[in-house]
Image (cartoon, rainbow, N blue to C red):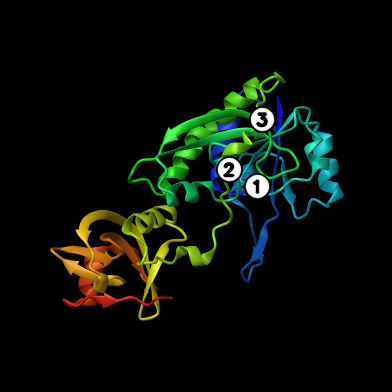
Amino acid sequence: MKIVFLGNPNVSVTILDSLLKTKHEIVGVVSNSPKISGRGLKKSYTPVGVYAINNKLELLCLSSFKDEKLYKALKKLNPDLFIVVAFKIIPQKFLNLPKFGAINLHASLLPSYRGASPIQYALLNGDKKTGVTTFLIDDKIDNGKIIMQKEFKINDNDNYESLIKKVESHGSDLVIKTIDRIANKNIYQEQNENYISYAPKIQKKMLLINCFENSNINHNKVRAFSPTPGAFVKINKKRLKILKTRKTSIKSPKENISKIFIKKNKVLIGCSEHFLELLEVQFEGKKKMNALNWARGMIIGSKGILLNES
């Protein structure tokens, strides 16, 4: 099958790499146009763009879908299928080009977590399982008919970094299986509207730890945003990224909320109901480090360090 692949970030590269090892033909790769940066005005390609160049694939750089040259170039390739992973909304005019349409890989069990941030929301909500879905793209966001799904567990120690690796692994397998089935037009299944939920783009204000929420909520927030962009608190108006935490059963009195303590060689932050143990942190302008080593350098007294509220 002749495939055009559309994507930008590293997760897309993993899927593209797995496709390149199959019997299918990658006739073209579409990725965002390179950014021009530095004194030498060097071109900075997306991870997918770099991969396409290194593997001598035909790279079509996208600046705008209004570009008629891009449309004509894709039409000339006469593709059977578009495979889309972590890309932008594609106009219907382009979706009509491939014989079998355009297939998207989404990092949730649709219709749950439609939108840009399904991995983060699964972690924020403390879900015990998630999955990947392949579906036929239509004119609405993450709305099309489902082709295949793969469910997998979210472990208690999973964060964004570890979970996206699971998405890459399971997603690669699912995309290949989907392509092998795609010629059968009876494989599609409508999404159940009773189970729709959304995962909109993450806002900066969501990264701030709110110690007046319970430790479980804040633990999940750390998992969702680690290692990047990183959940954080503020100390003397400087950011302390919290990269790894552990839930505790230690009660947190009201007067200890929004304070950091060292107790029995543990770094604890007071939250509603229970303390949350800090394991790995990164202070503004510094490298990430063990939380206890950081706290000892701060010389935290018995009364703890009071955090800024914003």
Within-10-Å neighbours for mark 3: few <14, some 14–19, many 20+ = few
Q: Which residue is drawn at 54% across and 44% down?
A: 11
Q: Position of residue 283 (x, y in %)?
A: 35, 70
- Which element is circle 2 on? helix
Q: Which of marks 3 and 1 is nearer the N terminus?
A: 1
> Which quadrant of the structure image shows residue 237?
bottom left
Q: Is residue 2 left or right of residue 8?
A: right
Check disc 2 and report the residue beneath it: 12
Within-10-Å neighbours for mark 2: few <14, some 14–19, many 20+ = many
Q: Disc 3 or disc 1, which is closer to the eye?
A: 3
Q: Which of marks 1 and 2 is nearer the N terminus?
A: 2
Check disc 3 and report the residue beneath it: 190
Q: Distance between the residues labelled 3 and 2?
A: 25 Å
Q: Which amino acid does label 2 sit on?
A: Ser
- Which element is circle 1 on? loop
> Which quadrant of the structure image shows residue 37?
bottom right
Check disc 1 and report the residue beneath it: 87
Q: Which amino acid does label 1 sit on?
A: Phe
The mark found on residue 290 in the picture is none
Q: In this view, does 214 lie above or below 87?
A: below
Q: Is residue 194 above or below residue 178?
A: below
